Amino acid sequence: MNMNNLNINNWIIKHNLETLDYYSESETIFAQANGYFGTRGTLEEGCSQEIEGTFVNAFYDTEEIVYGEAAYGYAKNRQTQLLVPNSKTIYISIDGEVLDVEKSIIENHSRELDLKTGIINRSLKWRTNTGKEVLINTERLISMEYENLMAINLSLKPLNFSGEINIKSGIKRDKLNDIDENDPRVSGELKYSLNIYDKYCEKDLIIAKSKTNNSNLGLITSIINKVDNVIDREIEKSDESTDNNIYESINIKVVENEVCNLTKYCYYYFDKQDRLENEIDHKIKDFRELCKNNYGYYKESQEKYYNKFWENSDIVIDGDNEIQAAIRFNIFHLIQSVGKNGKTNIAAKGLTGDGYEGHYFWDTETYVIPHFIYTNPDIAKKLLEYRYSILSKAKDRAKEMSYKGALYPWRTICGEESSAYYPAGTAQIHINADIMYSIKKYYEVTEDLEFMISKGFEMLLETSRFYADYSDYIEGRGYCINGVTGPDEYCALVNNNTYTNMMVRYQLKFLVDFIESLKANDKKLYNDILSKFNVKIKEIKLFEDIYKNMYIHYDEEKGLIGQDDAFLNKKVWDFKNTPKENYPLLLNYHPMVIYKHQVIKQADLILSMLLIPENFTYEEKKANFDYYEKVTTHDSSLSECIHGIIANELGYEDMSYKFFENTVKTDLYDLHNNVKNGVHIASMAGSWQCIVFGFGGMRQIDGVLHFNPRLCDKFNKIEFKIRFKGRVIKVSIERDKTDYQLVSGKNITIVNNGEVIELVKLF
Amino acid sequence: MNMNNLNINNWIIKHNLETLDYYSESETIFAQANGYFGTRGTLEEGCSQEIEGTFVNAFYDTEEIVYGEAAYGYAKNRQTQLLVPNSKTIYISIDGEVLDVEKSIIENHSRELDLKTGIINRSLKWRTNTGKEVLINTERLISMEYENLMAINLSLKPLNFSGEINIKSGIKRDKLNDIDENDPRVSGELKYSLNIYDKYCEKDLIIAKSKTNNSNLGLITSIINKVDNVIDREIEKSDESTDNNIYESINIKVVENEVCNLTKYCYYYFDKQDRLENEIDHKIKDFRELCKNNYGYYKESQEKYYNKFWENSDIVIDGDNEIQAAIRFNIFHLIQSVGKNGKTNIAAKGLTGDGYEGHYFWDTETYVIPHFIYTNPDIAKKLLEYRYSILSKAKDRAKEMSYKGALYPWRTICGEESSAYYPAGTAQIHINADIMYSIKKYYEVTEDLEFMISKGFEMLLETSRFYADYSDYIEGRGYCINGVTGPDEYCALVNNNTYTNMMVRYQLKFLVDFIESLKANDKKLYNDILSKFNVKIKEIKLFEDIYKNMYIHYDEEKGLIGQDDAFLNKKVWDFKNTPKENYPLLLNYHPMVIYKHQVIKQADLILSMLLIPENFTYEEKKANFDYYEKVTTHDSSLSECIHGIIANELGYEDMSYKFFENTVKTDLYDLHNNVKNGVHIASMAGSWQCIVFGFGGMRQIDGVLHFNPRLCDKFNKIEFKIRFKGRVIKVSIERDKTDYQLVSGKNITIVNNGEVIELVKLF
């Protein structure tokens, strides 16, 4: 670990703030969120090194994309998740001297993030230039129960004086200081966080209103400061033309050795601009209600929420404290970051940074959702409901692309395609099948037929219609899917990417099987749904014909499956003569140079082995893994976890462990040297998969759980729980045995190392 | 013809200006140029409908390209040929009333372009509101002999009065009025032509200085007005902040029924900004010298130049006056547009419009140069010298792309790659081979060994080094060229584009043969050149190995050559259900949709049949043409000419004629409805190829001319001349016989319909 002032002890991440080394990185580590909004772990009073960021999930603006050379059907608008006003800000001053972590005389400065509550506790002793000493403690939480609320408790204890302390607590519009002018993903115009166009005070409540330029969204940011021993308080506003802040300046009376508290309540809410005006009064009332509870109330609520959460979601690793902490840290960030209201999703960097513009990718379905399906299926459902909410946009996109049905955007917030480089964007049409794969797994795990009928079926049908129209029947080959990009972004616009073809085949079979099951089980429902969506028998026959005759490119001579038609006929990248500093290749080679070689950025065919294991014999897995792993650079953080899982299955223990370690430690140990810009959500979720699908060897095939556990010798024992068809199953894996315990629910059969076992409730 | 106020009579294009219908189109038709600079056929006094454009070849500015999503190795800067100040402007007024073609009372207004001189003669009778009548005549020429000079002769003849006429003649900075805000190729900032930063008058000479923002170029525009019967003259300058013009206002005394003349001399010169300051005095002196000659001198010089030009370059068509005029018009525009100084080239729209930003493409070598090689080989040489002048940039580009040798830019002015969409830009690496093909043909036709030694060899070697490094040896296939785009831009980033592979093979063989011939004929030269360029025998062996083992994709089952590895495995575009208004496809379908189908924008494999006919048997040509022609949309103006030539070879007379007619009439008959934006240089040159390579069936194989003439029944006879190895050969083709006449030079053998003939000088 290079961040040597971070110290991890079981559930607690402790940060020694005596130095400001790795300060920006720690802001990401200490980021808090609840899925609705999130904020980076900056100090209340700020600091010159900070990369402040407060994000409200799916609160974004749009801007026209400028292309060097545009063409028909290109994504039109950039969508950017905005940095919203910062409500954490609290300045403390004594005798006119302001607490400043870089200038003041400070002792014992540290903070802790408790993964069991999501609360950050910070403490320090400050001695002013006039010799006054005060113990300062802040606690901060973003409520998991009340999605709009953040609460900060500040306590001050003068050690050698009684008198006055001034608190300035408000809403701040930040000047951004992490703009890379050479990075085309960042607008050169974006010098400040979102502007505030109106700010005022209603009794003790401060409100700031903001709106976007193009996306028609409005945001209210509101705070209330509750404080003991007020002498006087007044509002200070700064100029709109500069930083445009609003503070309440409060003089409080303090008594030596007595603790004085300030609780700051912060509230974020957004909606369409026109609707928001009508909602404000109601929302302010809601906020005032919330402020009636004291800080302790919310602290308790957090404890309750997280207790319940960890009950199901914890993974216990016996044998490596670092990895134990890292996996918990990852799981913690997943639950913090994920949108839970069906209208939002989970961004590539969660709510911890502005990388990838806050966009939602296939990362959700392929990396994150498996974790939630088996631990919090209600959250998985909300993520899929988000996809349903943008289905009409996906239909529009398919039409624009000249095809029937629906094509989901490669990257988006509002549902429109926002990828400005289609060969690694729109061309990744596997996004449809990735989502449908999740729906299938979700449906099997939860048996939630209502979801399927009300939303799942329509998504499945429309995306299948897209594929049926997009697939080309080629004489002598069968159905081909040409001109697409698979998961591996070091190949683009290829024909018959095997991952894509297999996933589409899997989805079409799921659709046909689902229709068949309706027909067998509920004839009325069957008729209704076919009629509602105008599905003719002929269309079902076409879906069937396609999945039964989908082309898969086998190279008989080489005894390999082609990643696509052309892959194995390309030259292998000259790895031997590629200096280490030339990775990731995409930063050092022109795309066409990369594309013409056998070189893979991230798990592609190997990912199919995980998702649809029944497509491969063991020998096929081995032969292809052995070949493809050697030409994979893992230049994406979505790669090593998948290779780690399959490596474990094939008995490559060291390789598997190395990939797992790289995955699980990515953020907490800043392995990619960019954690300051935010966490890597997919890799965090991937580390969960490494444990459950990797060491646990869990696969869900035809609605049945299979386990082929194989624990590496670094660990003594791994324990996790799985929710499945109403049951909770606790799995304890040791090197030589695995124990399955049915924690709740009816008896169920599973398959352990090929052997069917019935799990029976013990009492 | 839709432009019904244009009338073509043999060498003269007459334009009835009584209405302003097709006025913008006529500006292109009446554009004049000499290769150094050119100007659109606008009226001296302007008109509200005008799309003024004056261009100096290779006078450009650069601007950073903004990408939606950038990547390593993308072209960095846009290069844009600039509109320079307009020196044609002359306003005429009587009693304060200004001649205005849209408001004044005008009779007999017409103009003529004489293709035998390149001079435009315009005449009209103007009656002022006060009843004064004057005959006005202007003649305008851009000197072919003096590259910096344009001369305008204005004569005024008062019919019913003697008195004063005011002439305002100067340099104007134009407000642009043809900006398409939706066209990303046009900078939104470009509202005016190039700015003038300094303007002044030295005695009778007016000078305006301009400079570019980023490309470090400076331009002087200068005029001198020579006029009879001056009463008084003064300088008028307009404000820099607006249009920034400078005029000389001259009151002249006129006498009833006597002609009064004004000759306006205009001068353009540019150089690097820093150099230009030192050159100005010298250039002004040069201009003053030129002004010592009267207008008649330059008229005579034009006549002389064009007499000589047409002597070699004319094509006589007996049987169709429209086509006769059109082919002459095309040939005329080629000689006007082509850069002749070795530092410039010929832009896609010549010097007649700002389309394609004034860039040079492969159009030069593949379409234009064949015409010049066989009619004006000195000009072909200059075009190739331009390529040599940018060789160092091509070497830099290859390096940036991680390869050895040199890679020429797909589109450029200054030599740097300027294509903002690499799949249809940099990926067209066939540009190297296209240039080398021209060098081979030029060398065979001229036997210009000095050019080969001083320039050609180095280009050939460095581009071959690029190909040798770029080609991949693939076991079981041979040398493959993967990840490229061929001429057909409806397929992109394909493997083994046959055109590319054949052209590379051809070039490598040429290089090896050339080295062998040096070795055989001049051992010292051979050693010197190998040592100078550090060529080892091993490297020559590699070139040889590559050309001997180049992979060509044959589909045995279908009995076809693949356009590339994947083409024949794609689905054929659904032409039947594509409405006519959806062409060109690129404006109505997303690129990835187009790329996944068998659909071709422009001649690709068919072009190989023309360029390297010896690669194909007649049966192969027929089978492949029959197949590929059906899936070709001809959505590019570079396509029909090539298909027309091969169609003629295969005996498809009607198809061939249709393609030829569409090609030859493209501009003069505005077949694409966009001639107002400039001529289509490649298609103009293509029409010459249709005649010589098509009806004449001429091919140059191993340095010998072969003819397989086949005249369609629309014509009685076609005659053209060919310069070849110091000879001039006149070819007269009738339906049933062809006559070859050796006009000058020593006896030579040619092949007519497979039969060797010796041409003997008659006297």
Image: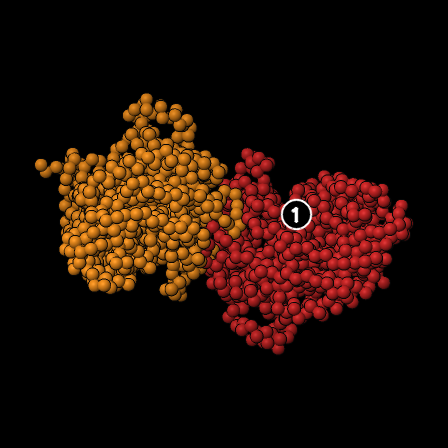
Chain colours: A orange, B red
The residue positioned 32% from the left and 57% from the top of the image is: A50
Q: Where is mark 1, residue-wise?
A: B677
Whether residue A81 can be seen here? yes
Measured from the top left, where is residue A486 in percent x and y? 40, 47
Furthest residue in direction left, as rendered:
A763
Measured from the top left, where is residue A67 in percent x and y? 50, 49
The residue positioned 25% from the left and 33% from the top of the image is: A447
Tell me the kind of residue under disc 1.
Asn
Residue B706: name its quadrant: bottom right
The residue positioned 40% from the left and 47% from the top of the image is: A195
For label 1, the SS is helix
Of residues B185 and A683, the one drawn nearer to the viewer in this rendering: B185
Of residues A347 and A113, the one drawn nearer to the viewer in this rendering: A113
The residue positioned 34% from the left and 36% from the top of the image is: A280
User: Could you tell whether B197 is left or right of B144 in the image?
Assistant: left
Measured from the top left, where is residue B177 in percent x and y? 64, 47
Which image quarter is the N terminus of chain A in?
Answer: bottom left
Of residues B85 and B509, the one drawn nearer to the viewer in this rendering: B85
Q: Given the image, what chain letter belongs to the residue carrying mark 1?
A: B
Measured from the top left, where is residue B624 in percent x and y? 58, 46
User: Could you tell whether B291 is left or right of B430 in the image?
Assistant: right
Of residues A628 and A349, the one drawn nearer to the viewer in this rendering: A349
Q: Is residue A187 above or below residue B388?
A: above
Mark 1 is surrounded, within 10 Å at the Cα level, by few (under 14), some (14 to 19) or many (20 or more) other residues, namely some
Q: Is residue B385 above or below residue B584?
A: below
Which image quarter is the C terminus of chain A in?
Answer: top left
Q: Is residue B392 above or below residue A342?
A: below
Total count of labels: 1
